[in-house]
Image (spheres, rainbow, N blue to C red):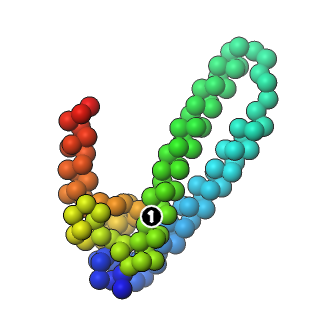
Amino acid sequence: MSAEVTELTEMELLTLKESMLTQKALILNKSHEFKEEQSSMSAVAEEAEAASQDIANNISIHLHERDRTALYAIERALGKIADGTYGQCESCGECISARRLQARPFTALCIECMEEQESHSNIFQ
């Protein structure tokens, strides 16, 4: 079923699925550690130490948000594997190249559509 949409062999698809499951587990573990770190923060006595802690917290929050975005993309890709649509571009419907999927396993767009999307977003920046 999935071989109709993607250029990947069944073995390559299985390898990518296992890789995404591993990435998902790592993100979930980091998320758990992040929540523990946030809840165990103690009151900071010195102003300089407080400022340093604030910067570290902001970085942690940014990284946590990036992980959440990746987790969402991984979940979508795993769902596509399950329903046999993995490897199909969400924009044009064409097959995403095996090389691109191996480089970015949870990508939703073929390279052409991704470049087009980026060129449109650069217009507004």
Residue 90 image position (x, y, % from top left): 29, 63
Residue 32 lies, with reference to residue 6, above or below; the image says above
**Residue 120 at x, y = what percent?**
21, 43
Q: Is residue 36 above or below residue 125?
A: below
Left or right, 97 with respect to 15, comes to left
Q: Residue 102: where, in percent of width, then height?
A: 37, 67
User: Which residue corresponds to the image point at 50% horizontal and 68% vertical from the top-left?
Assistant: 19
Q: Residue at x 42, y 77 (%)?
A: 83
Amino acid tagged 1: Arg
**Horizontal and vertical percent position of residue 28:** 62, 56
- For this view, does 71 lie left or right of residue 125? right
Residue 8, quarter of the rendered image? bottom left
Pointer 1: what residue?
Answer: 76
Residue 114 in view in this figure = yes
Q: Residues within 10 Å of mark 1 (few under 14, many from 20)?
A: some
Name the quadrant containing residue 5. bottom left
Q: Residue at x 45, y 64 (%)?
A: 76
Above or below 6: residue 33 = above
Left/right of residue 80 with respect to residue 96 in the rendered view: right
> Along the horizontal axis of the image, is 84 left or right of 31?
left
Q: Total marks drawn?
A: 1
